[in-house]
Amino acid sequence: MTIGKFHESLMNRDFSAAEALRETYREIDARDGEIGAYLSLARDGAMEAAEAVDDRIAHGERMPLLSGIPLGIKDNIMLEGEPCTAGSKILEGYVAAYDATAIAKLKAEGAVCVGKTNMDEFGMGSSTENSAFGKTRNPRDLSKVPGGSSGGSAAAVAGNMAIAALGSDTGGSIRQPADFCGVVGLKPTYGAISRYGLIPLASSLDTVGIEAKTVDDAAIVFGAISGKDPHDATSVEKTYGKELYESRPERIRAMTIGLPKEYFGAGIAKEIGERMDGVIAAFKGMDIRVKEVSLPHTAYALSAYYIIMPAEASANLARFDGIRYGTGGGGSASIKERYVDAKSRGFGEEAKRRIMLGTYVLSSGYYDAYYAKAQKVRTLIANDFKAAFAEVDALLTPVSPTLPFAFGEKTDDPLAMYLSDIFTITANLAGIPALVVPPGFQLIGKPFHEHDLLGLGREYERAMAS
Ligand code: GLN
């Protein structure tokens, strides 16, 4: 069910918010043992929120669109009174002391947060296999990974265990799981949605974003949670209006889409190439102009990302000492021994790998050679996009170079796992928005032009439905 349909039924009193929530939990109880989308369920808080919505409806109130909507929340986003582990043992037992701004805004609209979804530890990974708390399976094919790091959020939506979900995207973590699970994924412009209450991974790349069933649903959630927040100095005022929700087809059909030639080269699986051919033909069939463009520094993006990202992650992860919650034991050990013990046991392999990489590239003697250079490359990549957007309104690219892979296929080879991020990390480096639409393509847009991407995605959905 979509948000629009749910809202209509709720207002018609076809069902109550409490009934819908009970049905959601029935679905979770029946299916999630197998899928593993959720790490914890917020049954009490969710039921209270649903009953509050029903109360207001009983009093004849006209409710916001998100009222009663069951949502999944990635476990690195704070939901007050509920566990928030970021998929890491070092945060086991931690209970969020406050709501993230995105959550507070959702709650203000009457949305119902049903639980916290599984993820790669702190968001590091592309398959959710780096979670300290077990696997999430892809609802479309249980033998395959759901993608990552927001694999639990995508699986919750794809598996009908939430209507939409919040995730986070630092290098593709919303978009690649959306692609793998067959849902819509929106990574906003850096600054469009407040990061307050998101456990930071790489602060200059992190964004809060959305997994949803349709482009309309993603637009509704985005509209509700975006905007300036005094708690996040990098957040900005909303820049869009009604066009977010209702794109005028004439405006969309007057757009030109660019195909960056560097994203269609060797290394793409045959199935992905064929899928993209179909998508390009569909856009052409809608009379949207398509032309080739170039983003010449693409080849350096992965190297730059895997320097900047671990550098920032190593700084952000330094705060976790495992002393008040998580792995830290008491005893008579010295403070240093306790730290070493808590961090050794609390962080998984990928987190340790990135802490080492990150501290190395920031260390004296290597800073200029690696970190400073990567920052320059980042600027070149952002400039590539600026130049392309002088010619076209949006870019169309694949999301992942491959179809969903099997469990264990890439866990022994971190580089192979990193390579699956090749088409998604550039939008984070440039801070620009990107939208993934089934059957799995990515639209990349100008800063704060989410409405353009949503408009194009919506037109594509319409063309496919007709
Ligand atoms: N796969 C990317 C990484 O491992 C995605 C990170 C993210 O977006 N959280 O860094």
Image (tube, rainbow, N blue to C red):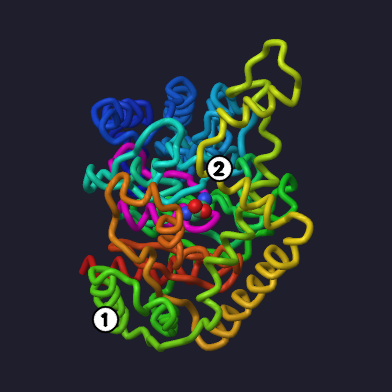
**Quadrant of residue 67 in the image?**
top left
Q: Is residue 182 left or right of residue 353?
A: left
Quadrant including the N terminus: top left
Q: Is residue 346 above or below residue 392?
A: above
Seen at 44% across and 41% down, the residue is 130
Q: Is residue 92 left or right of residue 260?
A: right
N-terminal label among 1 and 2:
1
**Quadrant of residue 364 in the image?**
bottom right
Seen at 69% across and 50% down, the residue is 359
The amino acid pointed to by label 2 is Ala
Query: Cβ of disc 1 within 8 Å of ligand 1?
Result: no
Q: Which residues are magenta?
A: 159-181
Question: Label 2, on which residue?
Answer: 351
Q: Is residue 177 magenta?
A: yes
Query: Dot 1, crowdedness within 10 Å: few (<14), some or many (≥20)?
Result: some
Q: Residue furthest top?
A: 331
Residue 347 appearing in the image: yes
Query: Cβ of disc 2 within 8 Å of ligand 1?
Result: no
Kindly identify which numbered label has been placed on residue 281.
1
Nearest the camera: 272 or 342? 342
Label 1 – label 2 distance at C-alpha: 42 Å
